Amino acid sequence: MMLRLLRGMAAIFPVLLVVGALAMAPTSAQAGALSDAKAAGHVGERSDGYLGPVGNPPASVMNMLRQINSKRRAHYQGIAAKTGTSVENVGFLAGAKAIQRAAPGTYVMDASGAWVRK
């Protein structure tokens, strides 16, 4: 089972490298707002490939999170369909990459599910 999972993940890794930037990139209008929300500590990258609220962010931030996460989910579904793996596997690979790329001082989710500053 584990070997099968690793093979599936290895198969989608090149695809994630090629299209990963698209999955992580919000629209240009959202990019500044997302950057501001991350810098303010309202938003963090989760290990499952989605953004999460840190604490109790304003409603406008929550709306932005829903929009971006919806786009990410759709993108992950496309990759999963092309590679024959699950959306969850794609999300976890993308989450690991997003956490790795997160700016110092921003929040990321650790393995236990807790928010920590990078």
Image: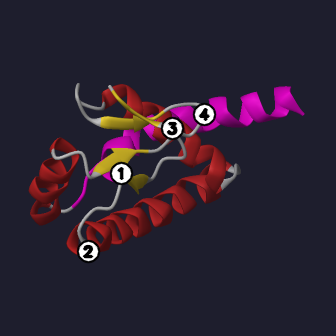
Spatial CA distance of label 1 from label 3 is 10 Å
Spatial CA distance of label 4 from label 1 is 15 Å
Q: Residues within 10 Å of mark 1 (few under 14, many from 20)?
A: many
Any part of residue 73 in sight: yes
Q: Are marks 3 and 4 in contact (CB under 8 Å)?
A: yes
Location of mark 1 (residue):
54
Q: Are marks 4 and 1 in contact (CB under 8 Å)?
A: no
Magenta segment: 1-26
- Amino acid carrying label 2: it is Ala
- Secondary structure under tag 2 reads helix
- Amino acid carrying label 4: it is Ser
Quarter of the view holding residue 118: top left
Q: Are marks 4 and 2 in contact (CB under 8 Å)?
A: no
Spatial CA distance of label 1 from label 2 is 13 Å
Spatial CA distance of label 4 from label 2 is 26 Å
Location of mark 3 (residue):
114
Residue 63 vs 102, above or below: the answer is below
Location of mark 2 (residue):
59
Spatial CA distance of label 3 from label 2 is 22 Å
Spatial CA distance of label 3 from label 4 is 6 Å
Report x, y in % for residue 42: 26, 52
Quick one: label 4 or label 2, which is nearer the N terminus? Answer: 2
Location of mark 4 (residue):
112
Quick one: label 3 or label 2, which is nearer the N terminus? Answer: 2
Report x, y in % for residue 16: 47, 39
Residue at x-position 51% and y-position 38%: 114
Quick one: label 4 or label 1, which is nearer the N terminus? Answer: 1
